[in-house]
Image: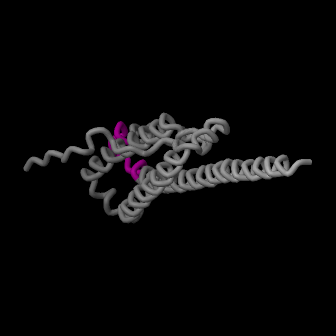
Amino acid sequence: MKKSNWILIGILVVLGLIIYQTFSGSYNKMVTMNETVESAWSTVETQYQRRTDLYNSVVSTIQGSKEFEQETLTQVIEARSKATGINIDANNLTPEKVQQFQNAQNELSGAFSRLMVSVERYPELQTTQAFRDFQTQIEGTENRINKARNDFNQEVQAYNTYIKRFPSNLMAGMFGFDEKGYFKADAGSENAPEINF
């Protein structure tokens, strides 16, 4: 073989290795980032489960009070059922699915807030040990949820940015690495609440 053929073969081998390294490195990074997003999602689900468990505990305590308003309690139980009924596969964290999950959790939070306002009219409930335990634990749980959501959003941002950049976007499209959804602020949350005295 001629010397020029060997040079051409050498150049092709080097180019092939460079392309292989670029694409395999990009693919492996997307796999790693996807796993990190799924792990962050698991943490979010765990914190919401913790909150649901706390809600279940206080709902059981309130159900024991015969005088308590059953309509408010029923709304919480229905919202809890809806929120726990929405399970999102970590492989399918589309923006629409994450929004659906968030909406159900917001509905549960709203119903539970109305329940807590109603509880203020029942001092005998407020003095039970289970209710006092709930009050001390729920604030910490809400903080954990916010932290888990923020961590999840950071991982999703890194992942989404990577799969949209060239040349990663070519690999992402070929291998089905799709955009993930974020947790977003509730509509109107940017406005300060009106406080009237």
Magenta span contains residue 72: yes
- Tell whether 16 sits left or right of 93: right
Residue 94 location in percent, x, y? 53, 37
Quadrant of the image occupied by residue 142: bottom left
Residue at 77 percent of width and 47 percent of height? 12
Q: Residue farthest to the top?
A: 96
Residue at 62 percent of width and 53 percent of height? 29
Question: As displayed, is residue 122 above or below residue 82?
Answer: below
Residue 98 location in percent, x, y? 48, 40
* Residue 52 makes an appearance in the image: no
* Residue 167 makes an appearance in the image: yes
Q: Residue farthest to the left?
A: 197
Residue 40 location in percent, x, y? 54, 55
Stretch in magenta: 62-73
Q: Nearer the viewer, residue 195 or 3?
A: 3
Residue at 21 percent of width and 44 percent of height? 191
- Tell whether 20 sits left or right of 57: right
Residue 107 location in percent, x, y? 39, 39
Q: Nearer the viewer, residue 150 or 171?
A: 171
Residue at 27 percent of width and 48 percent of height? 117
- Tell whether 95 sits left or right of 91: left
Q: Nearer the viewer, residue 104 or 67?
A: 104
Magenta span contains residue 143: no
Colour pattern of the rendering: one colour
Q: Nearer the viewer, residue 65 or 196?
A: 196
Total count of labels: 0
